[in-house]
Image: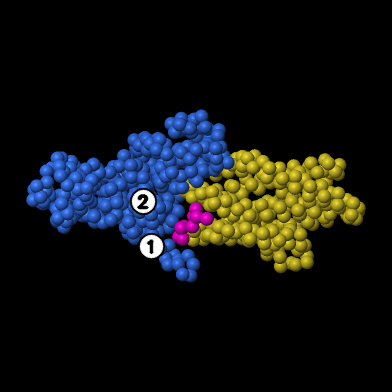
Amino acid sequence: MLTVLEANVRKVVIELMRYLPNTISLIATFYIIFLAMFLGISVIGDPASADANLRFAIVGNAFWFLLLVGVSSMGWELTTEATRGTLEQLAMSPVGLRTIVLTRMLGTLAVHLVITVGMLLLTMLTAGQWLRFDLPLLAAVLAPTFVAVIGLGYMVAGLALVFKQISALLQILQFVFLGFAFVPLAMLPWLELAPVVKGVDMVRHALVDGATLAAFGPRDWVSLLLNAAVYLLLGLLAFTVAERRATARGLLGQY
Amino acid sequence: MVDVVGLRKTFPARGRHAPAVTAVDGVGFRVGRGELVGLLGPNGAGKTTTIKALCGLVRPDEGELHVCGIDVRRQRRQALRHLAAVLEGNRNLYWRLSVRENMEYFAGNRGVSRAQARGRIDTLLERFALGDKRNALVSDLSRGMQQKLALAVAALAQTEVLLLDEPTLGLDVETGYEVRSLLRELRDEGRTVIVSTHDMPVVQDLCERTVVIAHGRVLVDDRVDHLLRLFASRAYEVQLGAPLSPGQVQTLRRRLVSVTVFDDGLRVQVDLAQGDDLYVLIDVLRSGGTPIESIDRRVIDFETVFRRLVRGETAGPDGVLDLTPDAALDRTGHHAAVRA
């Protein structure tokens, strides 16, 4: 598994370097968005809550972006591989397609996380304004949240295996995830059943209301972990069914 | 090493008006260790479906598939440890990665680290004459080099079985020879190689045996040299001292299986399918007083054999070439094992 992970992370990094103009534009976009947030919230918003608002806006935005990357990368990668003609080679790996797409997604997420954090640091340096984050709390909440993202990624990847053309679906998902990332759970409590919303809500409490790890009760953690486990299982199930359907219909490798 | 028994696959209809397509309908053959077998057939015969089923990429409706004794349908991942395949030639590569990076990546996906693969990659790059291109992007390579790299990637897996779909497609003559030589080396290493191809010189030059598939069924499973002998032995070219008369041509065409007249009647190509066909020919020529300058047995290539097989020609000089699977038992010794 580690060798497969290393191979796929390395491939993601190499391709980022080979498609340099695309990578540079991605980095520049992050920088500009973060800078606009810093300057916009500092100038327009209430000075008393500017710091909390800025932290939430930045984390919400970064989270939304990583959520999109996480959910769409598996499906996108499979579609691209099918177009290139390499999907069949991946499907013939003894480690299984499921493992390869997971490692590819983790590689893509890791690279984008590094770019996001790097650009955030650069923006803070440029703006001369340093934000403080409770990193242990963020890690504790975001880790299970991203397990649910993996589940969603598998669902999208399964659809990509069977239908191949999923770009329209991915565009719609952008707006759905925007809602997940920014709508408070207090407004729509039933959204707790939706993927990742609980995690984002806990992060919001931590960043805006100053909640600490101790502020969250067992119900919060159970809900968060259960949500992650259910969506991961659903994702794996969906991918397995899609893989079987693709092999039954001879769709692996065809675009 | 590779067993295919009763393979059937019908792809469901795509779209309301498109019919379901039966790609293979009871295909069966066996390939032993170290054999290099050609899988032949016209377009749409079922070759690629057979190969993809062996790779676990297509799930059959019926039939058994075993690679090194492992059931591909039930233990797909274990079976994949024993086989590697090149299915779409140079499209099986990442064009924005270098030669070396491609090999390292595919090795990694089989659980082999870069450190473990390094020595083997260097050896293969030298052997496939890609050593000086190791850092070149695949997109900058010629098609022949890309094809060789795809083969090298498959060879890197060090599996007992290699499945190659059209390995020489689109290559120039020189690179085609190079690839053939590499395939021969892989066979000589003791690997079992199944080559699906339309390139008849590859079959004639490399394969001990061929399995011809048409309309989703095995048409013939026999040794290549046997098929060549069988078809070559009945084809003759007769050079005449005087042209044939229209009456003689008509008689020959009526009494022999196949007659072709060239050079204004001075050269005749005949298939002497039956034992007394030679007497028929001599009688017709003598009746017109036509002198014979020479009679040569025609050198036949495998392309001609293949075309005749697919057209359904079955008559041989030593009787009838029975193309049913049972008939090949004695010649190949393989069907018996499959059926058993």
Q: In this view, does A129 lie above or below B133?
A: below
Q: Which residue is drawn at 47% across and 37% down?
A: B145
Choose top left, top right, bottom left or bottom right for residue A67.
Answer: bottom right
Amino acid at pointer 2:
His
Helix, strand, or loop for circle 1?
strand
Amino acid at pointer 1:
Thr
Q: Is residue B134 above or below residue A98?
A: above
- State the residue in front, B265 or B116: B265
- State the residue in front, A232 or B82: B82
Q: Which residue lies furthest to the bottom in this view?
A: B16
Left or right: where B264 falls relative to A167? left
Give residue A174's position: percent from left, percent from top: 69, 59
Q: Which residue is drawn at 55% across and 40% down?
A: B139
Q: Mark 2 points at which residue?
A: B66
Q: The yellow chain is which one?
A: A
Q: Is residue B121 above or below residue A5?
A: above
Left or right: where B215 falls relative to A34? left
Magenta span of residues: A247-255
Q: Which residue is drawn at 52% across and 37% down?
A: B141
Mark 1 or mark 2, earlier in chain:
1
Q: Residue at x 79, y 57 (%)?
A: A205
Residue A100 can be seen, yes or no: yes
Residue A227 included in the magenta stretch of the image? no
Q: Name the residue under label 1.
A: B22
